[in-house]
Each structure stands twice: as C-alpha cells, then as structure tokens.
Amino acid sequence: MRKLSFVGIVMLFVSIPTFAGGLLTNTNQHVAFLRMLARGASIDIDGVYSNPAGLAFLPTNGFYLSLNGQSAYQTRNILASSPLFPEGSRYYKGKASAPIIPSFQAAFKRNDWTVSASFAVVGGGGKASFDTGLPMFDALAILTMNSNEALQGLGAALGKPVSDLYGINSALDGRQYIYGFQLGVSYKVLDWLSVFAGGRMNYFSGGYEGFLTATANPDVPQIGGTKLADIALDCDQTGWGLTPILGADVKLGKWNMGLKYEFMTNLNIENKTKVLEIPAGMEPQFAAYQNGVNTPNDIPALLTAAVGYNILPTLRASVEYHHFFDKSAGMAGDKQKALTHGTHEYLAGVEWDVIKYLTISGGFQKTDYGLADTFQSDTSFSCDSYSLGFGAAIKATKRLTVNVAYFWTNYSDYNKSETLVPAAAALTGIDRTYSRTNKVFGLGVDYRF
C-alpha cells in the first residue's frame, strides 16, 4: 500500500493570513490606519510606522505615546470538486482569529531631532484552524486507499466500492506571529525636508499541530477498526532577522509627501519538533520537518510613497502606493518565483474635523498580489482584495486622543485546477475555489506629555 507521504508536502507551511498589507507584512500597526488607511503622509504619532521621517514635523517638543489594540477575525474557505469525492464536491472552512493584536509607538522630539520606537505584530498575528482537514489531505488519501489492491479485492468480494470500506479523519491548527521592535532617528534637514534612519528587529514564533488517520469501517468485519494510516505532527518554529529602514518627508505649504523604504529581511525559521509520527520507510520524505531543520521565510522589501493635502483647515486627504518586492524574498520551496509580480497596493483616505473634539475619517485600499496557481496551496493561499475602513478620533483633552475604527475586506475568489497523479488510464484532478473574509476592530489611545 502506498503510504500517505503527501502530508509532508503541505502540513508544515500553513500561512496565517495577515490582516492588512503584503503576503508576509502587517501594515495595520495603529488604529489610525484602520480608520483612514492612507497614512503614509501622516505627521502624528502613528507616523512611527507609516511615515517616520515626518515625525521631525511634530508640532511641539516633548514625549508622544500611543497604545493600540486590534481584534481581527477571518475565514479561509475552500470549495473543492473532484471525481474522487463520492458526493462530487466538499466544502472546507478554516477560521483564523486574533482576539488582541497589541502595538506600542513612542517618540521624543527635541527641536530638529526626533527619536522614535515601536513594538507591534508586524506579520501573522493569529491562529488558523481547519477542523475537518483540507482537500489535498482527503483527495490524496482517497487515491491512496482506492489504489490499494487488498482493499480493491475486498470491495469486489463484498460488492462495495472501496470508499465504503474506510473513513478519514484529519485536522490542522497553525499559529504564526512576527513580533517587531523598531528604533530610529528623524532629523529636519531644512524647513521643508526631513529624513529618517532606523531598523526593526523581527522575531518569528509559530506552531503547527495536525494529524490524519484512515480507519477501516467498523461495519466491515474482515478489517473493521483497523488503522490504515496514521500520521501526526507537532512542531514549533522560531527565527529572527533585522530590517534596515530609510525615510524622507517633504512639507510644502498645504502639501506633505512621505517616502519610506524597508529593506528585505533575511529570516530563516528553525523547527523544534515535539511529535513526528510517520509510516516506516518514509523518513526521507519528512526530512524537512525533523527537529533543527531551517526553512527560508524572508520578509520582502517594501517601498511606500504618499501625498497628503489640506483641502481646508478642517479637511485633509491622502493617496498612497505600496510595493512589496515579493519575488526577491526567499520562501519555502522557492514558491515566490511563481508570482507574476510583487504586491501592488493603492490607498486613499480622507479625514474631517467635524467639531473641535471630533474627527471622522474613511479610506480605501486595493491589493493586487500577482498570484499564480503554483504559488497557491490549501495551506497557504491569498486572494486579491479591496478594503474599506472608517472611524473617528475623539480628542478627550488637549493631550489625549482616542481612536476607534472598523476595517473590512472584500476578497476576490481564486480558482485553481490541479492534476494530482495518473489514475488508471485517466488523470485525476481537483478543482478548488479559494475564498476569504476579514474584519478588524480597533481601539487606541494617543497621549502627548
């Protein structure tokens, strides 16, 4: 009987979806982003991430502090169709949640110099659960069982299809966090020009736990209850890398332009495998999951450019562009080479001071990943999208501002057709429709000492 080595192809590399931004990068590091999105020309404390050079134009000397919390909820759904499935198609639902995504930003301004720091979840940020397994698990398990000669003979003798002789049970959980600590310095070179230099230390922490069992149908006395396949994996992963960051800001009257470049982060993640139960003889196929093995998981370089304009003293608007250099970043199995281009993001936002103590805002973001079939998999898939965000900034006092926001994403379905392996005289395939949902709530507090 051919063993279930296919689990080793996919189980470890579950990608927890990011809640805004590129394939491996979170850009929602402050609630002001959720309520306006285009914050790359900001001259406020959220600029620690979105426009660090602009901190040199903060209105007064002193210490600025921001504390933010976000709650994000996603679904990752797969509709799979294949002649292998007796019912023709199956629906798989994965849930990913992060009840709290914290972030912290701080800046100290003294004349032309500003020192800033932040701590945030800069990638990942949640746990994904597939309680009923995944299409690839089921389809290839069915292929394995249906091609087993002993089961074929037993099915013929009993007058039953092979699919009636066994049941498959599988599940997979994954978690992934990239924590980032950023430190840098902004300097006002001229009355209209400032620059920034800094860096971020990134620490990766992930964990994956899954199993697959195929058990003979207890109603078949000849083999009832016999385990036909049994695989289990419990693996933690860690790694770290450094991100150099440069920025510039140009402030001309009602106009402000922000520019930032984050260099690619070389990041390898190392296995700390606690459980790896596999069929005898399959050790080479599972070599990538042994304890101590390293896998590339680079964070792509990022270029952001934004322009803001004060339409009225109480009304401001911004447009922004992001480019993630995904094809230059090392990923597991070099799958980045399959992308047709790096990620493009287009953002726009507006905010209005309704009264002295209340600002409302809204924004739009369009994300194009350059996806390809060979990049997408059941355990790691992305979908092009557009996002809407809105919210308010409440000026509780002269020094204290409260931000509240809601962020929602609409994803385009991604359709993929795949041939699995030759079966008899024909090719056996599986069609998938990948879909996702996303919503994020945010609450934050900014304080100027």
Image (cartoon, grey):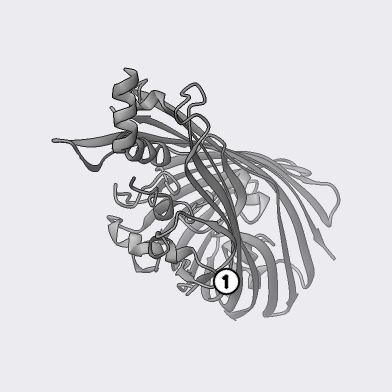
Is residue 85 among what the camera can see? yes
Toward the left, the furthest residue is: 425
> Residue at image x 29%, y 47%?
373
Q: Residue 291: x and y, percent?
A: 55, 69
Quadrant assignment, res 113: bottom right
- Report whether 414 appears left or right of 30: left
Spot occupied by residue 23 in the image (x, y as percentages of width and height):
45, 55
Q: Is residue 248 above or below residue 425?
A: below
Residue at position x 41%, y 43% from top?
378
Nearest the viewer among 75 and 138 is 138
Front residue of 181 and 258: 181
> With 448 as the anchor, is 155 left or right in this view?
left
Quarter holding the C terminus?
bottom right
Q: Secondary structure at mark 1?
A: strand
Is residue 317 shown to the viewer in this render?
no
The picture places residue 15, in percent across and down from the top left corner, at 50, 52
| Image: 66 above or below 128 | below
What residue is at 77 percent from the left and 66 percent from the top?
64
Q: Is residue 424 left or right of residue 203?
A: left
Q: Is residue 110 above or below residue 367?
A: below
Q: Where in the figure is residue 293, as x and y percent of width and height?
A: 49, 71
Residue lying furthest top in this view?
A: 159
Q: Which residue is mark 1?
A: 239
Which amino acid type is marked by label 1? Gly
> Could you say which is closer to the camera, residue 430 or residue 100?
430
Bin the neighbour count of mark 1 within 10 Å (Cα to Cα): few under 14, some 14-19, many 20 and up. many
